[in-house]
Amino acid sequence: MNHMTKLADHLKYLRKQRNWTQEDVAQYLNISRSQISKWENGEMFPDLQSLAKLSDLYNVSIDFLVGRQTNKQQLLREVNRIYQTDGIDEKMLDIIDYLKQNPHIEQAIYSLAQLPAKKRKHIESAVVSVIKEFLRATE
């Protein structure tokens, strides 16, 4: 994955984490919404000034935005800083990495999270049961 694709993915992810629209980000940066769309779709790369503003807006480093290789401990510090917690560990990073590599699973889990709690609990219970059964069968 190249830096442009990583940047696009990170910009979209960070925006959605905050429940912001492209218009919200565009207003903060004082640019057009279509510009944000082009960045998030990997059609264009932001200029350095815009990268700096995005870094400030999302409270992440430019290195993080462009997907510059970092070791797991650096990434862990960055993610915990973003979420102002120390509750994210290497196991959670592995899960995030898995989801980023499998966007269909990421979308399914996102859809699951949007369901009412009662419906979500039934599906979660079924998924956990299937995984446990599979793990027992492979031991």
Image (cartoon, rainbow, N blue to C red):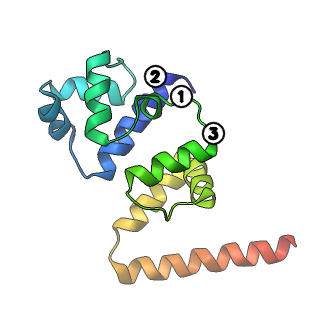
Quarter of the image for residue 38 reads top left
Asked if labels 2 and 1 touch by Cβ distance under 8 angstroms, the answer is no
Q: Is residue 128 above or below residue 80?
A: below
Q: Residue at x 61, y 47 (%)?
A: 73
- Classify mark 3: helix, strand or loop: loop
Circle 1 residues within 10 Å: few <14, some 14–19, many ≥20: few
The location of residue 70, given as percent across then percent down, is: 59, 35
Q: Which residue is the site of mark 2? A: 4
Q: Which mark is residue 68?
A: 1
- Classify mark 1: helix, strand or loop: loop
The location of residue 96, given as percent across then percent down, is: 54, 52
The location of residue 26, given as percent across then percent down, is: 17, 32
Asked if labels 3 and 1 touch by Cβ distance under 8 angstroms, the answer is no
Q: Which mark is residue 71?
A: 3
In the depicted view, which residue is nearer to us: 96 or 70?
70
Cα–Cα gap, marks 2 and 3: 20 Å
Q: Is residue 14 above or below residue 38?
A: below
